[in-house]
Image (spheres, rainbow, N blue to C red):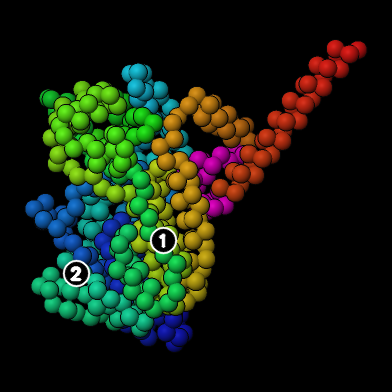
Amino acid sequence: MNGHSNGTHMNGMDKKPIVVVGGGSAGLLFCLLFTRKGHDIVLLESRGDLRKANDPTQNHRAITLVLQWRAYQSFLKAGVFNRVLKDMLPVKQRMVHLLNGKVVREPLDDPKFPSWFVPRLKLNEHLLDACEERSDITIKFNSKVTNVDKEGVVTYEDEKGQSRKIAAHFVVGADGVHSRVRQSMARLTRVNITVNQHPLGYKRIVFRPTPDGTNWRMLPYEGIHIFPRGDCFMAALPNWDKTYGAILLNNWEGPTGYDALNTDDKVRAFFTEKFPDVVKLVPDYMEQWKEHGANPLTYVSTAPWHYKDKIVLIGDACHAVLPFYGQGANAGAEDALYLSELFDQLDGDVTKMFAKFSADRIPAAQILLKLALEQQIKQISILDVLHLKFENLLHSLFPNTYLPLQHQILNTRTPYHKAYFRAQKQFLVLKMILLVVVVAILFAVFSKRFQ
């Protein structure tokens, strides 16, 4: 702490709490990373306590997440990694299930940079437990924020429907795609907000254990099982309870889109044609189809991410991204970690902290969205596999010089935009080298012929 009396510094003079809106992983990590930094923290969560299984307000569509280096560093700094680890499974390979029944295995395991599967609900349960153990964090469930004003006063409805107000030192909007904090910020200043729905939607499907409950339906279990089918796609990720949490990505429109699959016969025909292996692995797929509705894929782009020294947005509230690159939870966790690092670097100056956060993170989020849109449901071809193997070979030969884009995104904290531009430069240099080699070979061949 420092002795400044400026209200934009987090010091002992201003005892207003930091108010965090939204109890997802990004908001909870922020609370844990900012605990004992001089202010009490109040977390307002619009839903009930997810740890209460009978709570009707909970959204049980949660899927399994893949956590990588960015999230790993955030959990370590927050002191909760070992707590979460018991519900994690290591990511060691990717299994591509082709329509002809063949399975292509691609190793992903790197002992230096491990990745993990974890169910989103389990992750949030652990983070909530950790927050409740901190004396300077207060959690208010069933508290729906209606407005944040220019002074940082938060208006919300409590669980009894009564209107309440909290004067905050500053407000963190971690309340997701349909952020109320973002809406309030847009009323206070000019904000460029783009909210789009992708032509694809998703349904959740659970691969239950074998009938005797002793094993996973697919082996090896320490891998991502994907079923690419051109116009649709399924990905299944394992959990400790021997289930797989899967999502089916499919178009809304078209002859096999969600809107057209409106009878049992059409659904059966769709699965028989596209996913005959899933029909065998998930005997109750028809029941699950009826139970789990189709959900939209929404992505958000926002600029700026802050208002003066009073409001800052993190996670899906400012950069909800599509799932095709698997970085949404990792990027949100890194938001919380980066704000904590900026706080330490800038001696708690909130004005500078928010401005630098927006300036540094917005370009990274824009490139991440671009990568996700480009990835989409791209078919994995033999050329893709060869290209990846060639890049990995170059990286093994020149580990400090040649860094594949995938390595930079999954295994480092290099900002997404810097990783992307470095990869583009490397690719250009590589093409030039290959061109020179080809020209040299052709020159040698023709020189020999005309001698």
Where disc 2 sits, the SS reads loop
The answer to which of 88 and 449 lies nearer the viewer is 449
Q: Residues within 10 Å of mark 2 (few under 14, many from 20)?
A: many
The answer to which of 28 and 450 lies nearer the viewer is 450
Which labelled disc corresponds to residue 143? 2
Picture layout, residue 118 above or below residue 181: above
Q: Is residue 417 magenta?
A: yes
The answer to which of 128 and 95 lies nearer the viewer is 95
Task: Choose top left, top right, bottom left or bottom right for residue 336.
Answer: bottom left
Identity, as a three-letter code, of the amino acid under mark 2: Ser
> Which one is in front in this view, the residue at disc 2 or the one at disc 1?
1
Residue 123 x, y percent position in the rendering: 27, 50
Mark 2–mark 1 distance (CA, rounded to whole Å)? 26 Å
As drawn, is 386 to the left or to the right of 280? right
Residue 269 x, y percent position in the rendering: 22, 26
Residues rendered magenta in the picture: 399-419
Residue occupying image coordinates x 33% and y 70%: 183
Residue 209 x, y percent position in the rendering: 18, 29
Residue occupying image coordinates x 37% and y 74%: 185
Residue 165 x, y percent position in the rendering: 23, 80
Task: Choose top left, top right, bottom left or bottom right for residue 437.
Answer: top right
Q: Can you say which quadrant of the picture contains the C terminus?
A: top right
Picture layout, residue 124 above or below residue 218: below
